[in-house]
Image (cartoon, rainbow, N blue to C red):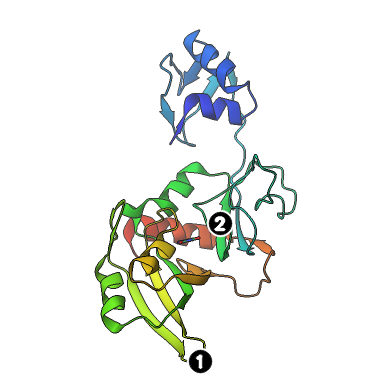
Amino acid sequence: MERLQKVLAQAGVASRRKSEQLILEGKVKVNGIVVTELGTKVTNSDRVEVEGVELVKEKFVYYLLYKPRGVLSTVHDDKGRKTVLDIFPEVEERIFPVGRLDYDTSGVIILTNDGDFSYLMTHPKFGIKKKYIAKVKGIPLRESLRKLERGIELEDGKTAPAHVKMQSVDKKSGTALVEITIHEGRNRQVRRMFDAIGCPVLKLRRESFAMLTTHGLNAGESRQLTTHEVKQLRVLAETGKIG
Ligand code: URA
């Protein structure tokens, strides 16, 4: 669901402000009915007309990028830092990253121009699982890992139950590799969870996003998702199961 004025602006009809004006002037129809309310939400299956001309819908595209470290997962940065779009091959569609990964986090990220799909993939109520491998300072106690698993109190509330597994311990350097699977996407969530047990994250990588992994890609490389994968992800969000 997108706001009508945003849909108009994205389709290149006019600026957001001018699109609002067109709506207020009664020049926009949704499924044959004049809509004058700003903020009316439409989906891709709604037919939108502006002054009698049907909007040409941009076709939806979906990509998986192996995000390297040192890149922002935004479309633009005011400070001129490199973003995922800077390292992405030129595409015609206005794609954006689905959710976010920190500047220093590497791994799977999806890029698309489909806002509804992005919502399904990121809202915690749809339960899409994201698995991370964290290299942490210190060797977490079993009880600390259990705390992460049950949910831990952060400043923005308790985290949802997670799946946590110790992968390996390096006693010499006093570090550990821990696998953690969550379905929420709060800001710097994994890092804050490990901070809360006194084992700060030294390195973080998103190993998988639902069934998607970086398999076959090097950092910085991308590929288009198959139609089947996109369908699987939708089904997974809508039913909690694949197929
Ligand atoms: N949690 C984090 O702390 N950072 C990320 O990039 C993703 C999840």
User: Front-most of 229 and 101?
Assistant: 101
Q: Amino acid at mark 1?
A: Lys
Residue 77 versus residue 187 in the image, above or below: above
On the image, the x and y values in percent for residue 86 come to 71, 50
Q: Residue furthest right?
A: 90
Quarter holding residue 51: top right
Label 1: how many residues lie within 10 Å, few (<14), some (14-19) or many (20+)?
A: few
Residue 23 versus residue 68 in the image, above or below: above
Query: For the residues carrying marks 1 and 2, which lies nearer the camera in this image?
Result: 1
Q: Amino acid at mark 2?
A: Ile
Residue where numbered disc 2 is placed? 110
The response on whether ligand 1 sits within 8 Å of label 1 is no
Residue where numbered disc 1 is placed? 172
User: How far is mark 1 from mark 2, CA to CA?
Assistant: 37 Å
Secondary element type, mark 1: loop
User: Front-most of 220 and 178?
Assistant: 178
Q: Which mark is residue 83?
A: none
On the image, the x and y values in percent for residue 103 come to 58, 57
Secondary element type, mark 2: strand
Residue plotted at (64% across, 56% down): 71
Is 105 left, or right, of 191 in this rendering? right
Residue 144 versus residue 152 in the image, above or below: below
